[in-house]
Image (spheres, rainbow, N blue to C red):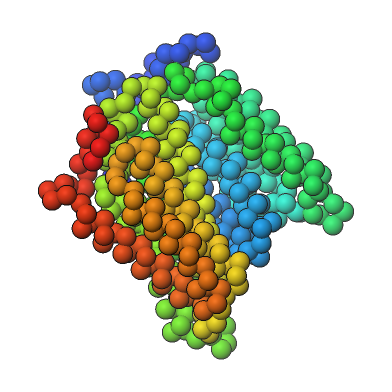
Amino acid sequence: MTRPDPEPTHAEPPSPAAPGPASPSPSPGTAGPDELPLRVTTLELFFDLVFAFTLTQLASLLASGFTAADVARVMLIFGLLWWMYEGYAWLTNTRPPVHTAERVLLLAAMAGFLTIGLAIPGGFGGAALTLGLGYLLVVAVHAWLYLRVNRNIIRVAPFNIASALLVIVAGLLREPGGAERPAGYALWVVALALQLGSPLIVHPKGLFELRPAHMAERHSALVLVALGESVAAIGVGAGRLAGHSGADNARLVFAAVLGLALAATLWWIVFGSGDEEKAEQVLTAASSERRTALALSAFFYGNIPLLLGLVAMAAGVGAAVERSGRIAAGPAGAAIVLAAGAAAFLAGEVAIRLRLRTGPVRLRAVAAVVALATAPIGAFVALEVQVAVLTLVLAGTLVLERRERPAGSGPASVDVTMGRI
């Protein structure tokens, strides 16, 4: 990830008049041939930190029981949050938040994401209505901000607002004890289907122009922030356990360092081969309509298994740290989630590389299958051992990929004409 450029303090970026609702012309803020590439601002990184907090909360929700119901709740909440995160990424890709009004509104959206994150542990219980209201704030601010730069958002915003209203109604349909009714879960499913299916009704081609450099950098920044947030959560959990009487601090530190080692290999998988620069080159070489399709399929859909895998691994590593006082078999659910998380992370990387053609995928696909096979290690030996094995599998994949790389090929070299490295 390249370092973000300083935010302008006295000059405003060019913002041509917005196209009308029926106009397929590029949206305002589109970089002209003589403009410098748009880079991620510090406020966007701040935004990503708040969004990453919701991922940490999802990991905590998953770790509360490692049941199928927990997995379903995490996927429903993540689906809605990820859709709106992408909406904000496309928004700031159109025009960076340099005006005071835009910055204030973006901070209001961050307050909405923070409210959602705080409500996630009880998102299908007593805090369901709070989560829905926070989501409505996120959706409403996004629609208002986007309307200022591209009126084509009028075609998409009704889907988002309807989805938020469905979540609010679901929050009102609770059992006397506070639990979600089956009808509430059904409304969540409809809300998610409404948003994920909206591109089939209103396709973004020709409606939203994208800047390649910013799009590639923004998603790389999010993955990096999410990795850092997961490591911080592991450290906080280990610190709390260290204060308990009878805790084996040496074993606790060892388990936490294992979690850091796993996160480091994940970082190397994503950032060690210059994929961000290659993705930027591929998007730059693509036509406007194909660029939109590539961004939707690679960055939006491709990052779904990647980030869900990161959430699952954070939950599994957290469980390993909690049980670090003894070598014993961990909960089968935690072992399965940990293995499935690593496999999903690698599957997301494979999907992104296949779509953008930024690197080889064979070894990573094999590693995903091997990662799934580590579940019995955690279930019958120990979660710590499973974390160590996963780290070795990922590290071994990186070593083998490096050996297979043709001599003289730099990490950022890519043939954007033929789509081959």
Q: Return the x and y of residue 45 as percentages of the image width and height.
A: 41, 45
* Viewer-proximal residue among 335 and 42: 335
Residue 177 sits in quarter: bottom right
373 to the left or right of 6: right
Residue depicted at 55% across the width and 27% down the height: 199
Which quarter shows the C terminus? top left
Residue 387 visible within the image? yes
* Viewer-proximal residue among 353 and 203: 353
Residue depicted at 58% across the width and 43% down the height: 79
Residue depicted at 38% across the width and 56% down the height: 366
Residue 45 visible within the image? no
In this rendering, is residue 229 above or below 154? Answer: below
* Viewer-proximal residue among 279 and 248: 279
138 to the left or right of 295: right
In this rendering, is residue 376 above or below 176? Answer: below
Q: Return the x and y of residue 118 as percentages of the image width and height.
A: 63, 54
In this rendering, is residue 256 above or below 49? Answer: below
398 to the left or right of 373: left
Farthest residue, direction bottom: 246
Q: Return the x and y of residue 128 as percentages of the image width and height.
A: 73, 48
Q: Return the x and y of residue 151 as percentages of the image width and height.
A: 52, 18
